[in-house]
Structure formats: structure tokens, C-alpha cells
Image (spheres, helix red, strand yellow):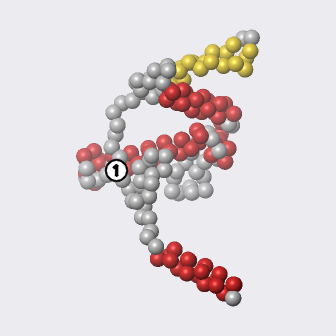
Amino acid sequence: MFRCSASWIVIVAFVFSLIGPFKTAQAMEPVLGLPMPGILVSLSPAYEPVLIKGLKIHPDNPLSLDFIVDSGNTQLTVNDPRLKTESNKLIKYFFAALTLPEQDVWVNLSPYEKSRIIPNTTGQTEMGRDLLAQDYLLKQITASLIYPEKGLGKDFWDKVYS
């Protein structure tokens, strides 16, 4: 009796999960704040991000490093915790780039090479995740710029077809 009841509960739950509301691609939350596929992306104004400008190595303790960070045009000040967060992310990138083999620092979002997206070692780092996000964004911007029904893309395709 218990098995039969449990089986019917599982079957009913499964059927209702199939009938329930579906999330469409447009309704899903974007990953890492990236635009959904198929959405036109416009260019942003020029921007200078936070950047590591230098490195100070202490001769008495070579494992003690001081990073010299430029806040770019972000308007972040020395006491701003967002500058510290951004600086820590850049320092992680620096150390990831030092420890990864040079041949493993690449990403590839080509639809023709689905088995070659990112090396396993790079994929385990925050830098690898962000490289993939930037490659995706680059492809979104390129597709938006050559969109054949607007501005630059219309001019481009008119010249291609002429």
C-alpha cells in the first residue's frame, strides 16, 4: 500500500512539473550581468578601468609584494572598499597568469569547436571565467555592430552586397 501511494505521488509530481510554467530564454536571469543571446548591445563610452601599474619587491623578503594600482577614471579613492575589491581581483589575475602554463591562457567560444572552450586549468580560475565573459561580450558587440538593419551594420552589408 505504501509503495503504491508513493509511486502515485511521484507520478503526479512529475506530470505537474511537466505542465508547470516554463522559463523562456528571455525571462531567464543573465549570467554575470552579461546580455542574453540575441539582444543588441550598444557601445559604451571610453573607460579606463582599475589597473596594476607596478610591483614593488622587498629585497629583504622577496615573497612580500606591494602592488601599485591606478584607479583609472573610476573615481574610486584609496579608502573605497570597491577599489580594494577590484585590486584583489587584479592581483588574483596576476598570480593566475604567473602559475598557469602560457599555452593554457586562452578561451574559445567558437560554435565550430565546442570541445575546445577553455583549458581545465584556466577554467578553474576567476580569470578564466572573466576571459570567457569578455569573449562572449566581444562576440555580442560584434554581432550588434554588423546587425544588417541598423547604422554601421546596414552600411557594412550594403557594401558587402554591392
**Residue projecting furthest to the right:** 60
Q: Residue at x 49, y 29 (%)?
A: 82
The answer to whether any part of residue 70 appears in the image is no
Label 1 Cα crowd, 10 Å radius (few <14 / some 14-19 / many 20+): some
The answer to whether any part of residue 73 appears in the image is yes
Query: Does residue 49 lie above or below 32 as drawn?
Result: above
Which amino acid type corresponds to the residue marked 1 in the rendered image? Answer: Leu
Residue 144, percent from left and from top: 34, 48
Query: Does residue 36 lie above or below 127 as drawn?
Result: below
Residue 97, percent from left and from top: 63, 33
Dot 1: element: loop
Q: Which residue is mark 1?
A: 40
Residue 125 sits in quarter = top right
Q: Residue at x 67, y 15 (%)?
A: 57
Q: Residue at x 55, y 77 (%)?
A: 13
Residue 1, percent from left and from top: 69, 88
Instruction: Using residue 136 as the reference point, say whether residue 100 is left or right of it.
Output: right
**Residue projecting furthest to the front:** 1
Q: Residue at x 74, y 15 (%)?
A: 61
- Of residue 69 and residue 112, the one placed in the foreground of this image is 69
Residue 62 sits in quarter = top right
